[in-house]
Amino acid sequence: MVRIKVRFNLGKGKNYMKWKIEYPNGKVEYYDPTTTQIIMNECELRNYKKVAEKIYNGANKTVCAWVLCKGIEIKTKGFIPFDITCDRIRYNPKVQPNWILNGEVADKQSIDMIGSVDYGLYKII
């Protein structure tokens, strides 16, 4: 199944620290996390485990994690964010080489709906 790929862009340049969205047709968009909310549905948390482990052990960061989703909605300017008391989803391979949800490893986990608030991702209940 071809899906939309969403990740946080840490590459230097004008799109540094923005959400990167890659569509199956090759289209790529970047969004500022402070002015945009991304709502993803039918999601899966993915990562390259071996790359993440190298980063965890001191290597420089490189692309190693993303969210695959079937559908996406982009909300900008004047959006009302959902309740951020939802469950936070974390990924930082310098801290742990896995996706983390509720203190548990969540690699490859399927989640019905994920939303962004600023630089964070949340499981929408």
Image (cartoon, rainbow, N blue to C red):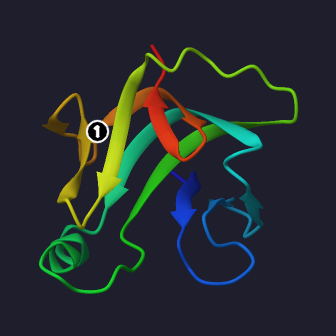
Quarter of the rendering containing residue 9: bottom right
What residue appears at the point 51 percent right and 21 percent down from the top-left corner?
Answer: 84
* Residue corresponding to mark 1: 109
Give x and y (percent) for residue 50.
17, 75
User: Considering the numbered disc 1 on the image, is that residue within a helix, a strand or a loop?
Assistant: loop
* 24 versus 57 height, above or below: above
* Local crowd size for mark 1, using a 10 Å CA cut-off: few (<14), some (14–19), many (≥20): few
Left or right: 45 in relation to 84: left
Give x and y (percent) for residue 47.
31, 61
Left or right: 89 in relation to 38: left
Left or right: 73 in relation to 50: right
Give x and y (percent) for residue 66.
44, 57
Q: Amino acid at mark 1?
A: Gln
What residue appears at the point 14 percent right and 35 percent down from the top-left corner?
Answer: 104
Q: For this rendering, which residue is in front, 23 or 17?
A: 17
What residue appears at the point 77 percent right and 66 percent down from the top-left corner?
Answer: 27
Q: For this rendering, which residue is in front, 108 or 89?
A: 89
Give x and y (percent) for residue 29.
76, 62
Quarter of the rendering containing residue 116: top right
* 6 versus 54 height, above or below: above
Which quarter shows the C terminus?
A: top left
Quarter of the rendering containing residue 118: top right
Q: For this rendering, which residue is in front, 100 or 110?
A: 100
